[in-house]
Image (cartoon, grey):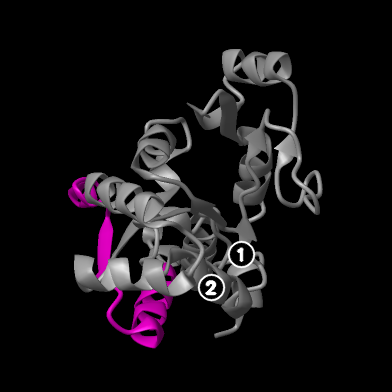
């Protein structure tokens, strides 16, 4: 695919998408997001803002936008957060400004958020450009196996993750697309197909109107 064609002027000009990718932990969302970014270098990953302190190795503006609680609240009050939540005493959210810039430039933004964050983004002023995709594991047994294979968590943590996974999965019907990740390559291919089709929707191709008018004038001449 010629990705540059997605950003040219003329009939191929379009508005950027807001791509929400959600899944329970261990279903393959992070790997799929990385593969999509490698497939299309124009795709930008949304960097969240947070009030928690940086961890060793984290870079401001790359891993998170680190800010104070007062500044975060001011952004929320001004409507400059597409979505936000408080987790264990810290605030997390998606700044609206960079997403709007990407939309105007015809660049898609990929969001790694849960169903609650997805709901807030869909309900925002930019909701008409949202494409939401939920990734399911082939089974809960396979999901637990993947979590245990990581070797990072205790049994208690894994039980907690599985409980949270069931809660996440219960919101599957709120998404535009639902994919069962039983084969990573096939799931990636389906994701690409979804994005290519959504990019071509008539209402998103901002260059079509002027192009068609020029065609009509050409015929009259």
Sequence-earlier tag: 2 or 1: 2
Who is closer to the viewer here, 153 or 115? 153
Q: Which residue is mark 2?
A: 36
Residue at position x 40%, y 86% in the image: 185
Who is closer to the viewer here, 167 or 119? 167
Q: Residue 192 placed where, x, y %?
A: 43, 76
The circle on residue 83 is: none
Q: Residue 132 placed where, x, y %?
A: 36, 53
Quadrant for residue 4, please give it: bottom right
Q: Which residue is mark 1?
A: 43
The local crowd at label 1, few if under 14, some if 14 to 19, many if 20 or more residues have their Cα within 10 Å, is: many
* Left or right, residue 64 beside residue 46: right
Residue 51's place in the image compared with 9, above or below, is above
Q: Check the picture and name the quadrant holding the N terminus.
A: bottom right
Who is closer to the viewer here, 119 or 103? 119
Q: Is residue 25 magenta?
A: no
* Left or right, residue 20 beside residue 143: right
Residue at position x 22%, y 50% in the image: 166
Quadrant for residue 149, please give it: bottom left
What is the chief secondary structure element of the magenta stretch? helix
Q: Which residues are magenta?
A: 169-196
């Amino acid at each position: 695919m010629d990705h540059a064609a997605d950003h040219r002027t003329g009939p191929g000009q379009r508005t950027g998408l807001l791509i929400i990718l959600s899944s329970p932990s261990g279903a393959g969302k992070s790997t799929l997001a990385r593969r999509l970014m490698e497939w299309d270098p124009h795709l930008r990953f949304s960097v969240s803002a947070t009030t928690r302190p940086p961890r060793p190795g984290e870079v401001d503006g790359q891993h998170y936008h680190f800010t104070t609680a007062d500044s975060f609240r001011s952004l929320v009050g001004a409507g400059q957060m597409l979505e936000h939540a408080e987790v264990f005493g810290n605030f997390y959210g998606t700044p609206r400004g960079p997403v709007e810039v990407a939309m105007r430039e015809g660049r898609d933004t990929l969001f790694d958020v849960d169903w609650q964050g997805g709901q807030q983004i869909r309900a925002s002023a930019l909701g008409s450009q949202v494409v939401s995709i939920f990734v399911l594991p082939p089974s809960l047994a396979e999901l637990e196996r993947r979590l245990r294979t990581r070797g990072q968590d205790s049994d208690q943590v894994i039980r907690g993750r599985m409980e949270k996974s069931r809660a996440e999965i219960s919101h599957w019907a709120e998404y535009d697309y639902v994919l069962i990740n039983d084969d990573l390559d096939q799931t990636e291919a389906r994701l690409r197909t979804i994005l290519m089709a959504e990019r071509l929707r008539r209402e998103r191709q901002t260059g079509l109107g002027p192009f068609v008018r020029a065609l009509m004038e050409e015929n009259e001449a």
